[in-house]
């Protein structure tokens, strides 16, 4: 994508164009507005070679919005030259990651439960195509492990994580669904006392339980929120094999996160190593993390 062309396009259509630098995605994000009215919009720019996957995500977001889920309203999807322009409503609110710890414990737990209920509703959307999940996740494990071995940087507690993965846990062929793909407090807004879910740019299809694999980022800030999210999702009746499955997905991410973070720099690699150490500290002769017990 030619950034000069993108900025020229945006400046032709909007009086005010403000780049947004939060987040770890490679896409370009902007807050835009015109002098003629007070409306602001959120714009996401992607390469045109991602058109099929991006359109799928946009369409799924439209479906979720029409079902009444608290997400940004999708407004338009356009292709311009070699890039895609997706426009959403702008929501004034605070990123939950930055304020959650300042809220009282009961509010943290209630927001977690609400996040779990919203996630459950996201997973009501079926997969676009049937999937053999066990075969898919095995291939994913092999790809991530190969990339990890080739990157030359070690994850903390490598042998313990590898042991979990090599046990070939009973990952079931559950019916796959649409996934948010990056569900944690950094992708949630707190607006007028309400939770708003944002940033679906990593959404895809898969085991709905895999959507809990980013909960470590939320737990680092508020274990009560994370506990509430699980209980809200399962309506306080958590299946016996959930935590075993979640530990498998945590271990898979421990390997995959290192080569993924390298292009973002040493600081991001260090963050992923820190998260791996944090997750490892949760387990004491049980697949149920200590903060949940």
Image (cartoon, rainbow, N blue to C red):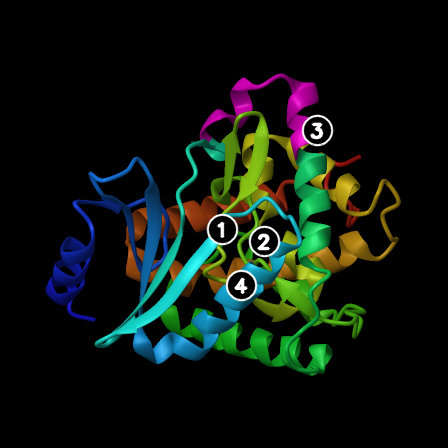
Picture quadrant where residue 101 is located:
top right
Q: Can you give x and y, in whole percent of width and height, for residue 151 in the image? A: 37, 69
| Comparing labels 1 and 3, the label whose residue is closer to the camera | 1
Looking at the rendered structure, the secondary structure element under dot 3 is helix
Q: Which of marks 1 and 3 is nearer the N terminus?
A: 1
Q: Tell me the residue that label 1 is attached to.
A: 73
Q: In 3D space, how far apart are the residues under numbered discs 1 and 4 (Cα atoms)?
A: 16 Å
Q: Tell me the residue that label 3 is attached to.
A: 110
Q: In 3D space, how far apart are the residues under numbered discs 1 and 3 (Cα atoms)?
A: 24 Å
Q: Main secondary structure of the magenta part?
A: helix
Q: Residue at point 46% right, 49% down?
A: 273
Q: Can you give x and y, in whole percent of width and height, for residue 144 in the image? A: 51, 72
Q: In 3D space, how far apart are the residues under numbered discs 4 and 2 (Cα atoms)?
A: 15 Å
Badge 1 density bin: few <14, some 14–19, many ≥20, Cα 10 Å:
some
Q: Tell me the residue that label 2 is attached to.
A: 65
Question: Residue furthest toward the front?
Answer: 36
> What are the residue bounds of the magenta stretch?
98-111
Q: Tell me the residue that label 4 is attached to.
A: 203
């Amino acid at each position: 994508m030619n950034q000069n062309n993108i900025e020229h396009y945006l400046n032709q259509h909007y009086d005010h164009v403000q780049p947004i630098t939060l987040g770890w995605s490679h896409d370009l994000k902007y807050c835009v507005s015109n002098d003629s009215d007070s409306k602001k919009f959120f714009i996401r720019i992607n390469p045109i070679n991602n058109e099929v996957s991006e359109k799928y995500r946009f369409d799924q977001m439209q479906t979720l919005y029409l079902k009444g889920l608290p997400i940004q309203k999708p407004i338009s999807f356009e292709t311009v030259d070699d890039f895609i322009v997706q426009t959403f409503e702008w929501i004034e609110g605070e990123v939950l990651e930055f304020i959650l710890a300042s809220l009282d414990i009961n509010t943290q737990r209630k927001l977690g439960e609400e996040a779990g209920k919203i996630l459950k509703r996201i997973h009501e959307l079926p997969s676009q195509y049937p999937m053999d999940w066990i075969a898919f996740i095995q291939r994913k494990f092999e790809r991530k492990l190969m990339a990890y071995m080739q990157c030359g940087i070690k994850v903390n507690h490598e042998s313990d994580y590898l042991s979990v993965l090599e046990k070939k846990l009973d990952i079931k062929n559950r019916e796959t669904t649409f996934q948010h793909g990056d569900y944690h407090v950094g992708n949630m807004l707190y607006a007028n006392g309400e939770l708003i879910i944002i940033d679906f740019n990593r959404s895809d299809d898969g085991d709905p339980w895999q959507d809990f694999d980013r909960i470590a980022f939320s737990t680092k800030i508020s274990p009560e929120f994370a506990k509430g999210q699980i209980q809200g999702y399962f309506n306080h009746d958590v299946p016996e094999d959930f935590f075993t499955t979640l530990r498998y997905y945590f271990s898979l991410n421990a390997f995959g996160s290192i080569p993924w973070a390298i292009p973002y720099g040493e600081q991001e690699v260090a963050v992923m190593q820190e998260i791996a150490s944090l997750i490892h500290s949760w387990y004491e002769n049980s697949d149920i993390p200590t903060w949940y017990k």
